[in-house]
Amino acid sequence: MDLEKERIKINCNFCKKDFVLTFNTTQCPNCGENFSPEEVHQVFYNYESRLANSKLYRAGEKMQKSGERIEKTGGFISQIGCFIFMLPLALLCLWFLINMFK
């Protein structure tokens, strides 16, 4: 997970208004109050930890892995289908070549 691309909607402790917090936010856009970069980063680290330990996130990761496996299986089945389709054509061409030189 790339924390620098994440955004969290948060309530400012000073002006009590909502705003979107990014990893590099240094002040509230509404009241201009400064935030400590360490505090902001800690909020994101806690968010990442909660997210990584949530059941929904882990289920989503399992679904993504299953999707990748299904995609690989589909590619293999597609190759088998092409082989089965081309086999009669190859046999037909071979038959024509054999009959041509008799």
Image (cartoon, rainbow, N blue to C red):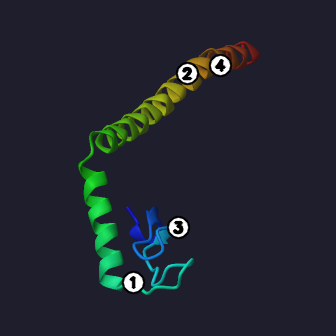
Q: CA distance from mark 4 to mark 3?
A: 72 Å
Q: Dot 3: what SS?
A: strand
Is 53 displayed left or right of 30 in the figure? Answer: left
Which of the two residues, 42 or 57, is positioned nearer the viewer here? 42
Q: CA distance from mark 4 to mark 1?
A: 78 Å
Number of marks drawn: 4
Q: Position of residue 7 (x, y in %)?
A: 48, 64
Q: Label 1: which residue?
A: 35
Which of the two residues, 36 or 93, is positioned nearer the viewer here? 36
Graded by Cα atoms within 10 Å as few (under 14), some (14 to 19) or many (20 or more), the crowding at tag 2 reads few
Q: Please report whichever mark, 4 or 1, sits nearer to the chain's N-terminal start.
A: 1
Q: Residue furthest right?
A: 100
> Label 2 is placed on what type of residue?
Gly
Q: Label 3: which residue?
A: 19
Q: Position of residue 59 (x, y in %)?
A: 32, 37
Q: Position of residue 25 (x, y in %)?
A: 46, 79
Which label number is shown at residue 94? 4
Q: Dot 2: what SS?
A: helix
> Label 1 is placed on what type of residue?
Phe
- Residue at point 31%, 60% (across, down): 48
- The quarter of the image holding the C terminus is top right
